[in-house]
Image: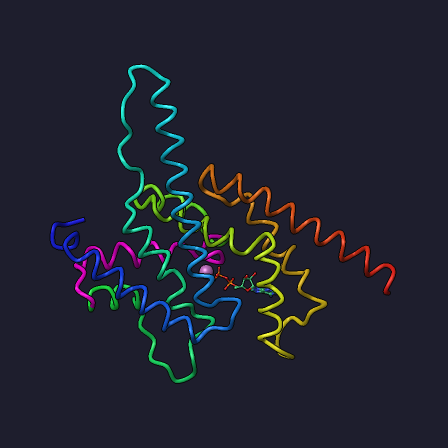
Amino acid sequence: LSESDQAMVPDLLSKTHAFAKNYMARYDSSHDFSHVLRVLNLAIHIAQTEQKYLQSVALVAPPATSVAPLYNTTIVTLAALLHDVGDKKYIQEGEEIDEFPVKTFLVGSGASEALGERVQTIVNGVSYSKEIKDPQRVLDLTELYPELAVVQDADRLDAIGAVGIGRTFTFAGAKGSGGPGMENVLKHFEEKLLRLGSMMKTKTGKEMAEKRIQVLRDFERCWLEEKTIAG
Ligand code: ADP
Ligand code: NI
């Protein structure tokens, strides 16, 4: 970060927290501010665990060296807080579309253009549907912006496991009769959620995903067992 961005960090973090909280109020509760806070906590956890892992490897392989920080914590935090800002699924009718809402907000809050663009690029890279269309693009982006790998893994972890299951039914409930309906929620497991495990970018993310994918499989199995009896 530039010196002037560094000086702005405390102010930017508190403004971003308030902005994200207010912004997420427009979404349904599968996608609310508690999702954002879980993603933030997961992202910080992944970043710290990856750092510790590399550090431990460096210490046992002589000459022991200290490992430069892999991730910038401010970037991880800003990108996690803002990762769902501008989601096209939720644009309201008649709403003016800003192609770069994250950058607009950050620069308007005193960040440099460079910082605004960096966080916007990471946020744009989180998308699952864009990655399916062009997987190499995301891999190239993570080389330039390692924080993308961390925030993307964190967002995906929150879509699987027990919390992920809760979110699918919350999503279906919020969409009402125009949505998938309770009976079709399990299709979303096959179409998307069970695929996320192989798309994790960090070692820590992969390990956590394995456990959570197993929760999805167990749930699916129990559901089918119950359905066999209930018809
Ligand atoms: P995010 O943008 O946070 O990655 P999505 O916008 O894809 O997540 O979806 C928000 C939540 O709603 C997720 O937990 C996801 O699993 C769930 N969801 C999305 N589409 C469906 C669907 N067709 N059926 C059930 N759940 C869904
Ligand atoms: Ni999200």
Q: Quadrant of residue 105?
A: bottom left
Q: Position of residue 150 (x, y in %)?
A: 40, 46
| Principal secondary structure, stretch drawn in magenta | helix
Q: Which residues are magenta?
A: 109-131
Q: Given the current orientation, which residue lies at the most extreme left position?
A: 4
Q: Position of residue 197 (x, y in %)?
A: 56, 45
Q: Is residue 126 magenta?
A: yes
Looking at the image, residue 165 sits to the left or right of residue 14; the answer is right
Identified at 85% across, 59% down, the residue is 228
Q: Position of residue 202 (x, y in %)?
A: 44, 40
Q: Nearer the viewer, residue 122 or 60?
A: 60
Q: Quadrant of residue 47?
A: top left
Looking at the image, residue 169 sits to the left or right of residue 27; the answer is right
Q: Is residue 58 magenta?
A: no
Q: Given the current orientation, which residue lies at the most extreme bottom position?
A: 94
Which quarter of the image is occupied by the C terminus? Answer: bottom right
Q: Given the current orientation, which residue lies at the most extreme top position?
A: 62
Identified at 31% across, 46% down, the residue is 145
Identified at 24% across, 68% down, the residue is 104
If the picture is divided into quarters, which one holds ligand 1? Answer: bottom right
Q: Position of residue 121 (x, y in %)?
A: 31, 56
Identified at 26% across, 59% down, the residue is 13
Q: Nearer the viewer, residue 98 or 23?
A: 23
Q: Nearer the viewer, residue 181 or 10?
A: 10
